[in-house]
Amino acid sequence: MNLSGQAAIVTGGASGLGAETARVLARAGAKVTVVDLNAEKANAVASEIGGLAIACDVSDAASAEAAVAAAREKHGAARVLVNCAGIGPAKRIVGKEGPMPLQDFVKVIQVNLVGTFNMMRLAAADMSKLEPIAGERGVIISTASVAAFEGQVGQAAYSASKGGVAALTMPAAREFAQFGIRVMAIAPGIILTPMLMALPPEVQQSLGASVPFPKRLGHPSEFAALVQHIVENEYLNGEVIRLDGALRLPPR
């Protein structure tokens, strides 16, 4: 699909992978809505790219419905949805203070998995009513993680949520095929997001050295470039693409 003139929604668009994706889609000519819980940062990105900012809790049905409706009113129904909203707190199932509070696990699942599904269901409903462009009505791209396949100690909730995102991709792609809507996911490895940039330089270098090739941390621009390629390559459907430099994390 050619992005020029098309409406796109990026969740988690106020920072990191989402912000860079919003920039790349806007440069390709898309009308971008930046959706994020942080209204101030979302507005900053939207102002930079000439887009629309909407404060939204993707895990809440009413909040997401209102966000999609506002984006539709401004730009028309979105033909592209990129789900980048997510959280990744590290906590052991059983730590020094006892078992992980159940609500801590539930919150990660709610934001990362339920939030992804919530936005997917709403965007797909809109896309299914659009006129097809060369047989295609829309593209939905979600963010999984290598942790879905190789989760480490302390990543139980995060890995479970991202494993769910990966597992959601194929059945959604098969269901939406009748409408000409493609569904994909990207599973990033160690990407230089603001959270990693806060770590000491020596820690960043050590993490980068663990990547087989290239021996460095990934860049948000590489994630965003893959998003654009997926949108533009109509034969990509139902797949989870690892973006990790062949990273294989040893158990610890």
Image (cartoon, rainbow, N blue to C red):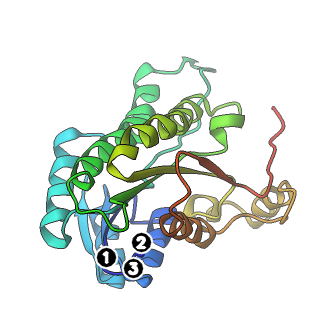
Closer to the eye: label 2 or 1: 2
Disc 2 to disc 1, C-alpha distance: 8 Å
Q: Quadrant of the N terminus?
A: bottom left
Give above or below for 240 relative to 32.
above
Disc on the earlier residue, 2 or 1: 2
Confirm or deny contact between disc 3 and disc 2 (CB under 8 A): yes
Which element carries disc 1, helix, strand or loop? helix
Q: Which residue is mark 1?
A: 46
For label 3, count other residues whose C-alpha is less than 10 Å away and answer few (under 14), some (14-19) or many (20+). many
Which element carries disc 2, helix, strand or loop? helix
Q: 146 or 137, which lies in front? A: 137
Residue at image position (49%, 72%) is: 20
Residue 191 x/y as whole percent: 65, 60
Residue 30, located in which quarter of the rendered image? Answer: bottom left
Confirm or deny contact between disc 2 and disc 1 (CB under 8 A): yes
Disc 3 to disc 1, C-alpha distance: 10 Å
Residue 208 x/y as whole percent: 80, 61
Q: Which residue is mark 3?
A: 26
Residue 8 x/y as whole percent: 33, 67
For label 2, count other residues whose C-alpha is less than 10 Å away and answer few (under 14), some (14-19) or many (20+). many
Answer whether residue 114 is visible to the viewer in this image.
yes
Residue 233 x/y as whole percent: 54, 66
| Tally of marks | 3
Please, which residue is most extreme toward the front here?
A: 134
Residue at image position (37%, 35%) is: 114
Disc 3 to disc 2, C-alpha distance: 6 Å
Q: Which residue is mark 2?
A: 22
| Left or right position of 174 against 162 | left
Label 3 is placed on what type of residue? Answer: Ala
